[in-house]
Image (cartoon, rainbow, N blue to C red):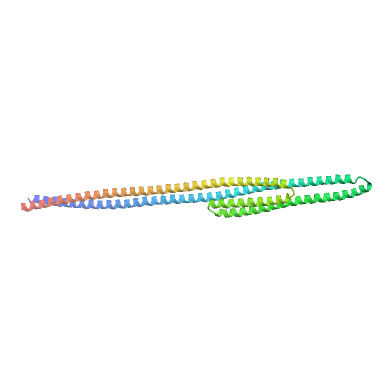
Amino acid sequence: MLVLASSVILVTASSVIFVTASSVILVTASSVIFVTASIVTLVLASSVILVTASSVILVLASSVILVTASSVILVLASSVMLVLASSVIFVLASSVMHVLASIVTLVLASSVILVTASILILVTASSVMLVTSSSVILVLASSVMLVLASIVILVMASSLTLVMANSVMLVTASSVIFVRAISVILVTASGLMLVTSSSVMLVLASIVILVLASSVMLVLASSVILVTASSVTFVTASSVMLVLASSVILVTASSMMLVLSSSMILVLASSVIFVTASSVILVTASSVILVTASIVTLVLASSVILETASSVMLVLASSVILVTTSSVIFVTASSVMLVMK
């Protein structure tokens, strides 16, 4: 009986020690696993959030830089194109009006010379017919011829001087207007470079072009009317030519401005649509990435927590069962020993 009791006590004690050691080991291991899993989960979640946020910030920053750069380049290119188009239109208009003025000047000069020559021939013939009756009359006729020749020379010289003076005035006026127009265009262009609104640039350019064209046409028309005041028919024809030329220039300038305006509006509209679409796509993509990352993080964390909790519950249940069993065995053995004694 003593041997049996000793055996029971040893078995019970060893069972209790084994169960206790196993429980401690299991509890310690489960705690380490739970802490490790929690740390890993937090690190993974933090890494995912940081990486996702960094990617979104980088994409948004890159998009903003690209959109800003493209907008600046578009505005500068539009300004340069508008200034160049305005310069070309004004140079073409000035060249056309200068050529017309030169043609008018040449026609006037030839008309004055023809009229003067006709008058001189008529006067000379009449004088010769009248003074050919006697030698005295011939002498007088010679004197008259000299006087007439002097008058003819003076008239022709004054006519040519007048024509040349008018030509110089026209050329000088055209040059001054052209220089002033170039200065205005340069000043306006430098101002337009600072303006970011395409509508303001188009309106200013249209006003400058119309004002310059109107000034040039008004000066040239006034000069032509003053020079050609002696011939109503020629003045009428010149006026018609000027009106037609100015109409063609205005229609051409208006058409080009309309085309440029339409192009600018289309380019700006497409740019706005592109920027809006890009922003929507980027915002949607970043939202989807953030939502997906959050869901994945939550699912991973939930899975780890559930698995860890299940392991802990299993270990605790096993420990309780082992402790309960060992306690029952110990109590039973003690009772048997007491009864046997």
Residue ranking furthest to the right:
135
Q: Residue 73, image x and y in percent? A: 53, 50
Residue at 89 percent across and 50 percent down: it is 143
Number of marks present in the image shown: 0
Q: Nearer the viewer, residue 308 or 123?
A: 123
Which image quadrant for residue 244?
top right
Q: Residue at x 81, y 50 (%)?
A: 155
Name the side, left or right, on which 116 lies relative to 319: right
Q: Is residue 177 visible?
A: yes
Image check: 214 left or right of 169? left
The percent position of residue 278, horizontal first and vertical second, equals: 45, 47
Q: 274 left or right of 309?
A: right
Q: Position of residue 77 (x, y in %)?
A: 55, 49
Residue drawn where x is 30% and y is 51% of the image: 37
Q: Depth check: 286 or 313 in front? A: 286
Nearest the viewer among 235 and 304 is 235
x, y percent for residue 248 = 63, 45
Side of 84 relative to 316 (left or right): right
Q: Is residue 10 visible?
A: no
Q: Residue at x 22, y 53 (%)?
A: 24
